[in-house]
């Protein structure tokens, strides 16, 4: 019996994911360019997507694909009309990055509250300067986006003693998170918290969601944390809110343009933490992602339902 054919999209200049767990389960072709993708497409039903920034699917189209598995949790590069309106099954790699991202969020909230960045600077200056810091216990946090990352974040922050409110697309009660408020309540809630954490995906509904007006609704001295997608935030408006002193700081793991250009003003702001889209990347994460794909590949071959299937139709289409 012949093996199914699978395409693995990998960014140019980046290593191929560990193939040991799946190379015997399929006939694998690694592609990096649009031309390589076009050549590999005919008759290939499976795609293992290892490039969350790829434009190949928008440039070339999905061809004969019937199943796409992504190495990331986010699937915004797949929100094209051709894919969303098709019967292509999409699954992602849940369980790999959610907890690490939540730990990163906790870490940056603690870093700002305890002024650890300034502590390091003063140590390098050999300066003994007594300062007071903010408490974590009872700190009020708003998490916008109750998906897998948002869930882990809410539970971890609550475990650390913070009071966490959750906002999602619709109001509902969740078994793990409790009450979830709707986007329509966002503006009212922004002024009630010390930190706003963005964990939502990029869709047409969330693009530019945090702009000048929303920053003005936040409490003066509040901070922003973004681990979702860079385009959810209007970066020029965030910079204005930071430079004016209205917001006390921001921790950003995602940006509208990645890598962040060397001339971008975010680099030089002492109250902005720039992280290279790495909040969820623990040692060995590539191998764990490959194992997720391999496990689903075995289910695909056996005709069994796939795990961690994503409902793209529920997310809608987004611009490239």
Image (tube, grey):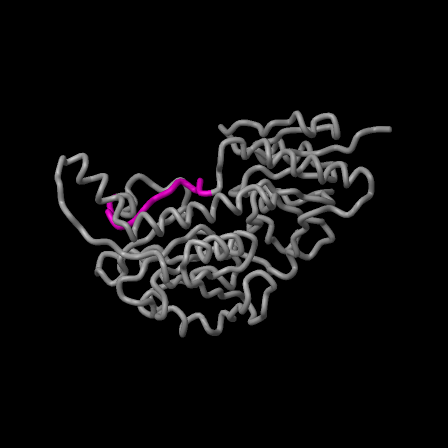
109 left or right of 145 in image:
left
Q: Is residue 113 magenta?
A: no
Does 295 sit above or below residue 272? Answer: above
Main secondary-structure element of the magenta-colored stretch = loop
Q: Quadrant of the N terminus?
A: top right
Viewer-closest of 55 and 222? 222
Give the percent coordinates (x, y) of residue 224.
36, 57
From the viewer's side, name the closer residue of 267 and 151. 151
Measuring 59% from the left and 31% from the top, which residue is drawn there? 287
Span highlighted in magenta in the image: 268-279
Where does residue 158 sit, x and y in percent of width and height? Answer: 45, 58
Residue 33 visible in rendering: yes
Quadrant of the rendered image containing residue 285: top right
Q: Residue at x 64, y 45 (%)?
A: 61
Q: In this view, does 104 lie above or below 150?
A: above
- Residue in view at x 26 percent, y 50 percent: 271
Where is residue 265 drawn, in percent x and y? 27, 47
> Residue visible at 62% across and 46% down?
92
Image mark count: 0
Report if residue 275 lies within the magenta region.
yes
Which of 77 and 135 lies nearest the eye of the viewer?
135
Kindly tell me whether residue 320 is visible in this rendering. no
């Amino acid at each position: 019996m012949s093996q199914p054919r699978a395409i693995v999209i990998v960014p140019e200049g980046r290593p191929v994911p560990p193939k040991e767990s799946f190379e015997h389960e399929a006939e694998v072709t690694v592609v990096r360019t649009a031309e390589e993708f076009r050549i590999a497409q005919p008759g290939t039903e499976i795609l293992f997507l290892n490039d969350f920034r790829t434009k190949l699917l928008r440039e070339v189209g999905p061809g004969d694909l019937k199943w796409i598995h992504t190495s990331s949790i986010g699937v915004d590069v797949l929100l094209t009309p051709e894919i969303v309106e098709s019967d292509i099954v999409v699954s992602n790699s849940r369980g790999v990055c959610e907890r690490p991202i939540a730990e990163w969020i906790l870490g940056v909230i603690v870093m700002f509250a305890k002024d650890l960045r300034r502590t390091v600077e003063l140590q390098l200056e050999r300066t003994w300067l007594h300062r007071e810091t903010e408490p974590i216990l009872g700190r009020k946090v708003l998490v916008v986006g109750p998906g897998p990352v948002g869930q882990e974040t809410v539970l971890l922050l609550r475990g650390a003693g913070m009071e966490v409110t959750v906002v999602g697309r619709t109001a509902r009660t969740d078994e793990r998170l409790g009450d979830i408020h709707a986007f329509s309540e966002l503006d009212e809630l922004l002024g009630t918290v010390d930190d706003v954490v963005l964990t939502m995906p990029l869709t047409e509904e969330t693009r530019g969601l945090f702009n000048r007006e929303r920053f003005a609704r936040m409490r003066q001295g509040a901070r922003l944390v973004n681990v979702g997608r860079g385009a959810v935030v209007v970066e020029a408006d965030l910079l204005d809110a930071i430079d004016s002193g209205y917001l006390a700081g921001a921790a950003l793991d995602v940006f509208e343009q990645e890598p962040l250009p060397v001339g971008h003003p975010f680099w030089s702001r002492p109250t902005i933490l720039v992280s290279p889209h790495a909040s969820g990347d623990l040692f060995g994460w590539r191998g764990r992602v490959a194992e997720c794909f391999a496990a689903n590949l075995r289910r695909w071959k056996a005709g069994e339902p796939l795990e961690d299937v994503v409902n793209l139709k529920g997310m809608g289409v987004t611009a490239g």
